[in-house]
Image: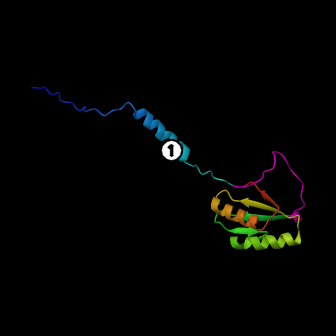
Amino acid sequence: MKIRKKLRVSEEIPTCSMADIAFLLIIFFLVTTTMNMDKGLGLVLPGFGEQKRVRKTQICNVWVNAAGSVMVGGEIMEISKIKGEIKRRLAENEKLIVSLKTDKESQYGTFIEVLDQLKLAEAPVISLAVPD
């Protein structure tokens, strides 16, 4: 009579290659993941301390108050009409400087909408004035 040896099945989970698998998964996700970078506002700002004297006839003031109303050169107008008004003023005076000034309490979204309209009007020089 032959004695048979019973093979015992191990009740443990083999963990010797677990670190290798985890490392390979980390490398895989690092290589295949892409990150979207926000572009932000494309503005060219002057250096610190640069100042120029400009005649008042060459400046078009654009004010945004806390309620979101916009005034261009003393006239209250809708944001959607700013582009046409600035284009008209640029046709009259090609050296026009647009000065944008906002209230401290105004919404950031309103400021961006007005700035977008000024850029769509192809204003060559936009001055961002400091709020009082």
Q: Which residue is mark 1?
A: 29
From what the image shows, is residue 52 above or below residue 23? below
Magenta part mainly helix, strand or loop?
loop
Magenta highlight on residue 55:
yes
Decide which of 79, 116 is in the foreground and name it.
Answer: 116
At numbered mark 1, what does the secondary structure look like: helix, strand or loop? helix
Q: Residue at x 23, y 33 (%)?
A: 9
- Give, as a single range, the part of the protein colored magenta: 41-58
Image coordinates for residue 52, horizontal then vertical, percent:
88, 53
Q: Residue at x 90, y 61 (%)?
A: 55
Q: Which amino acid type is marked by label 1?
A: Phe
In the rendered image, the residue lying farthest to the left is: 1
In the rendered image, the residue lying farthest to the front is: 1
Decide which of 79, 76 is in the foreground and name it.
Answer: 79
Task: Give the quadrant of the C terminus.
Answer: bottom right
Task: Describe residue 82's horizontal placement relative to residue 22 as left or right.
Answer: right
Specify whether residue 107 is in view: no
Image coordinates for residue 98, horizontal then vertical, percent:
80, 63
Specify whether residue 54 is in view: yes
Q: Residue at x 85, y 48 (%)?
A: 50
Image coordinates for residue 25, horizontal then vertical, percent:
47, 41
From what the image shows, is residue 91 above or below residue 125? below
Task: Describe residue 110's horizontal placement relative to residue 15 as left or right.
Answer: right
From what the image shows, is residue 24 above or below residue 119? above
Task: Describe residue 58's horizontal placement relative to residue 128 as left or right.
Answer: right
Decide which of 51, 6 is in the foreground and name it.
Answer: 6
Image coordinates for residue 122, horizontal then vertical, percent:
79, 66
